[in-house]
Image (cartoon, grey):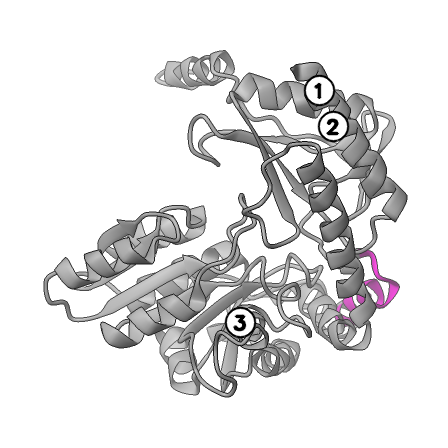
Amino acid sequence: MPGTDFVLDELERLESLDQRRVLKSLKQANARVVSYQGSQLVNFSSNDYLGLASHPRVKAAAQAAIEEFHASAGSSRLICGNLEIHERLESRLAGLKQKEAALVFSSGYVANLGIITALVGEGDQIFSDALNHASIIDGCRLSRAQVFVYRHRDLNHLEYLLRGAPAARRRLIVSDAVFSMDGDVADLPGMAALAAAYDCLLMLDEAHATGVLGSTGRGIVEHFVERGELGPGKEYVDVAMGTLSKALGSFGGFVACSSNLREFLINKARSLIFATALPPSAAGAALESLHLLSEEPLRREALWRNFDALKSRLSESGFDVAASETPILPLTFGTEAAALRMSERLAERGYFVPAIRPPSVPKGTSRLRITLCATHFSGEVEGFAKELSELAQDRG
């Protein structure tokens, strides 16, 4: 095809750097096991932290929502796609986050795009963590606001940028709550103090925090309140974004906020206005998962038990996992080739953990991103730790 020589050139370049991505076709997959190339492998790469995506009640709720509301919402929410099940879900999400209101988007990625570009624009400023998710980075770029990137979790650098920046119409501090490639947690107490001192809106992406952090899974605010680092009953996060596709085992994105901000986003968030609404099945599944979040606390306890066991074993084997505070454990191997090799060798021994390479992570930090789930058996966690230790020793 004329004019597309660059496509093959770029693919060949990525191949030479061990950075070319390929889709892995899975015959069957859940939080605990996958069927890949004819083998059953224990899955240590899923974001389905509580194993709710395969819960019988969650699947039944998705099917019931299809029966009542059909397979598609059929339109954007502002035309004829705003279904009663969306509003029920938003009411439950607002309760979970202890906010006045919530608004559901068709994915977490488009939620971040829509929220950020609605909140700030030309003449405004954004202060963004260097390791924020790609959806936050893209939202910052699309907003046309002036973007200041502070060193990862370095609040001294953040304050330096806040203090030195010129006057602006509006300021936004935005960060992941849990960083998806490293498993560390944002310093909410420090960020909230800076937001108040420098008159900024504070937005946190709780994709990997919702359902995981806090004794009831409410997220990062509950986490720090229970640690005694924040006082209860106060507003610390103006814009609490989250996803339905991780611990809640469904699909979609949301924001929990004030009622006024919800109405503002309905009128200003282009990725809500111009996108077909969330499928009813996803809304039904998420609603049931929210019930299970409170009804089955043993799932979260099992998740943290598995995390503690694996982190302890990996630390004993010499892996540097100290920074991770959540069920995300990164094992960095440096080069793309080394990470790919380790992933392939683990697959040969019955474990599915794809390699993560640039540009998903900074150059020189290619890794295995290990994630735990509540449904992993203790023997699987122990066996996985043993194999990793042996392979690492073989590697020298």
Magenta range is 54-65
Circle 3 sits on which residue? Answer: 224
Q: Does residue 62 show up magenta in the picture?
A: yes
Q: What percent of the width, then of the height, locates residue 296? A: 82, 72
Q: What residue type is labelled 1?
A: Gln
Where residue 183 sits in the image (x, y, percent)? 56, 49
Residue 269 visible in the picture: no
| Front of the two marks 1 and 3 | 1
Helix, strand or loop at mark 2: helix
Q: Where is residue 178 in the image (x, y as percent from the top left)?
A: 53, 56
Label pair 1/3, CB-CB below 8 angstroms: no
Tell me if residue 115 is in the magenta stretch. Answer: no
> Which residue is at the far left?
166
Question: Are the residues flagged by discs 1 and 2 in contact, CB closer than 8 Å?
Answer: yes
Q: Main secondary structure of the magenta part?
A: helix
Mark 3 residue type: Phe
Q: Distance between the residues labelled 3 and 2?
A: 33 Å
Q: Is residue 321 above or below residue 325?
A: above
Say which element carries label 1: helix
Which badge, 1 or 3, is on the more N-terminal residue? 3
Cα distance in 3D space between marks 1 and 3? 38 Å
Q: Do the residues labelled 3 and 2 touch (CB within 8 Å)?
A: no
Instruction: Please report the residue visible at 25 percent of the width from the left and 75 percent of the height from the top.
Output: 197
Q: How crowded is mark 1: few (under 14 residues within 10 Å), some or many (20 or more)?
A: few
Residue beneath disc 1: 393
286 is higher (above) or lower (below) than 176: below
Quadrant that contains the N terminus: top left
Q: Name the residue under label 2.
A: 389
In the picture provided, is 153 more to the left or to the right than 52?
left
Residue under the image location 81 percent in, 46 percent down:
32
Q: Which amino acid does label 2 sit on?
A: Ser
